[in-house]
Image (spheres, rainbow, N blue to C red):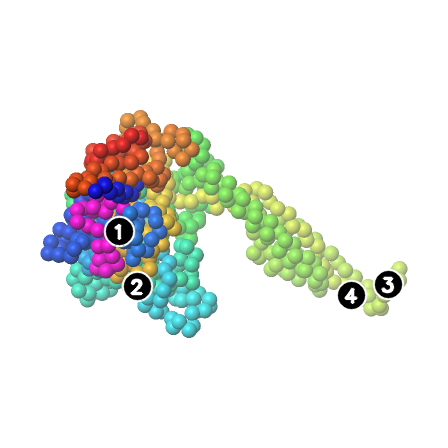
Amino acid sequence: MASRYVVEHLNHLGLVAEVCREIGMADWLDQQEPGNRQLVSVGTATVAMVLNGLGFSNRRLYLVPQFYADKSVEHLLGPGILAQDLNDDCLGRTLDWLYEHDVTRLFAGLALRARRAFGIEVGRLHADTTSFAVHGQYALDLPEVVETPDTLKAAVQSAKERADEAADEAADEAADEAADEDEGAPTVIEVTYGYSRDHREDLKQWMLALVTSGEGVPQFLQPLDGNASDKRALVEAVQALTQQLRESGEIPGVYVADSGLYSAETMTQLNQAGVRWVSRVPETSTAAQGVVQERVEALDGWQSSADGTRSWWSREQPDLAQGPERWIVVRTQEGEARARATVQRQAERDQVAWEKRLWHLGKRTFACQPDAAAALATTCQRLPAWWVVQSTVVAKAGYAARGRPRKHATPSTQTWQIQATLTRDAAALEREALRRAAFIVGTNLLDVDGWPDEAVIALYREQTAVERGFAFLKDPLFLASSVFVKRPERIMALAFVMTLCLLVYQLAEGRLRHRLAQTGQTVPDQKGKPTARPTLRWLFQCFEGIDLHHTLHSDGTHETEVLRLTKVHRLVLHLLGPTYEKCYFAFQETAE
């Protein structure tokens, strides 16, 4: 009898599976309920969903068996696991189990294992929220028959008002509500209308609070209602992660957030909890507006970075209700260029409108000069500061008889008209651009020697770490496009799986970049040029085409070869570690 041949695709999935094994993802999840006897354990099924998510195949969860049909399932997930075992019933039960065991608590446990396995530091922590739009009714806020653009906008406004009311609730009321709930029971999120970061106000949404390390490795997640308040959600996330870190014997670092976190109430809570923070101060604050205006008009006291791209000025604000803070007014060359372009466009738009208003004003007649001057003042009440109106009041004689008056005729009446011209004040326009380009970074780190201004600014600029994480989660090729589950409970569980994908991705990318820099080695980028900071997405593409070739002999024995491994693949695997090499080198290899 002739030998049979079977080819299974391995690609980059071996890298993903080994990261999951290194942090003990499946084993730890299974330990949370040792008595679970389903064919595919919840830990293994969760790893399977992570592999599907990082397969970038854009398949819905019910198509997971199709995704695994040509993959080396046993090699990735363990002996005895078949593609057809990973059906929608299995994955649905796993999502329900994840929700019932509190996804925030489960992620905290896995994040701790990841920190210990990969040496992730928590000296810098970045917090933010985002929204995910979904298609479907879920818990209806409005009858389907009245879902028009007007009612959708009204629903959004109502959702915002409810979020503001929720944010203003007293702490004792929140505690009473929590006490009424079953102890330890997870709260189901409400999928509803709210402020959409994706500009899809016509769709319902849910939100996600995320805290990452400085390198972008997620450390905390919390699914939220679609109309959740940023201020309340962010401060709760910071307090919860702080408690988790202290319980594990770790010292929380400095938390960084955008202006959504900042308010006198939230800063007071964080200061009382001993939390160190850096946050952008909202421009809506009267005190912030005053400080920015003051520094725009003053030329002294500014400092600049070595490359000249940033300038800043700082001082301590000792009289704030929440306690003393250091405020740093920052401007960047890039921000100034954007602000100048913005105010120039606005000036060009406004010029047409204001010239039209002044033209209509010039056609009016007034009984006296004071009336004309008053009308001009009223018209120019909202004139931007960078426009200057030069005007004269001209007398116009009136005669009783029609037609052209005689040479020495005496006027019977006299009226007044305004002749006005509009000119642009370049200096005022530049001041406005500088004002718009300036923003305030606030912090309770008052030790300037320990935390210089430039270090605080650099820390705030690293906030893009969490924003890159959100961009990853919203990638059309990623699992986020598969959020079509029917129940909010499963959306919460799917949020957990999505964030696990981000965790695995960032862990592998961070280790590889660190060891490339450590050894002074490089890998080719998309253009074939050497780089020490490749993206893991690119390396995943480089691993496409790696297959396992099984030869099944008639006597029952078999041989397995790994096809298409190159020097770049070997280098990446060597840098990631011996277990990653074993995943690909455990079989006899063919020539390159």
Dividing the picture into quadrants, the one containing residue 589 is top left
The residue that label 3 is drawn on is: 404
Q: Position of residue 302 (x, y in %)?
A: 43, 36
As rendered, which of 383 and 500 lies closer to the eye? 500
Type of amino acid at the residue the image marks with label 4: Thr
Q: Nearer the viewer, mark 4 or mark 2?
A: 2
In the displayed structure, would residue 44 be above or below residue 547?
A: below
The residue most toward the top is: 520
Q: Mark 4 vs mark 3: which is more N-terminal?
A: 3
532 on left or right of 353: left
10 Å crowding of disc 3: few (<14), some (14-19), many (20+): few
Q: Label 4 belongs to which residue?
A: 413
Q: What residue is at 26 percent from the left and 61 percent from the top? A: 489
Q: Residues within 10 Å of mark 1 (few under 14, many from 20)?
A: many
Q: What segment carries the magenta color?
A: 71-93
Measured as percent of width and height from the top left, residue 181 is found at: 19, 65
Q: Viewer-nearest of labels 4 and 3?
A: 3
First-in-chain label (4 vs 1) = 1
Three-letter amino acid code of the residue under disc 1? Met
Q: Nearer the viewer, residue 520 or 442?
A: 520
- Which disc, if any, is residue 49? 1
Q: Within the image, what quadrant is residue 170 found in?
A: bottom left
Magenta stretch encompasses residue 77: yes
Tag count in the figure? 4
- On the image, the x and y values in percent for residue 592 come to 31, 30
Indicate the quadrant containing the N terminus: top left, top right, bottom left or bottom right: top left
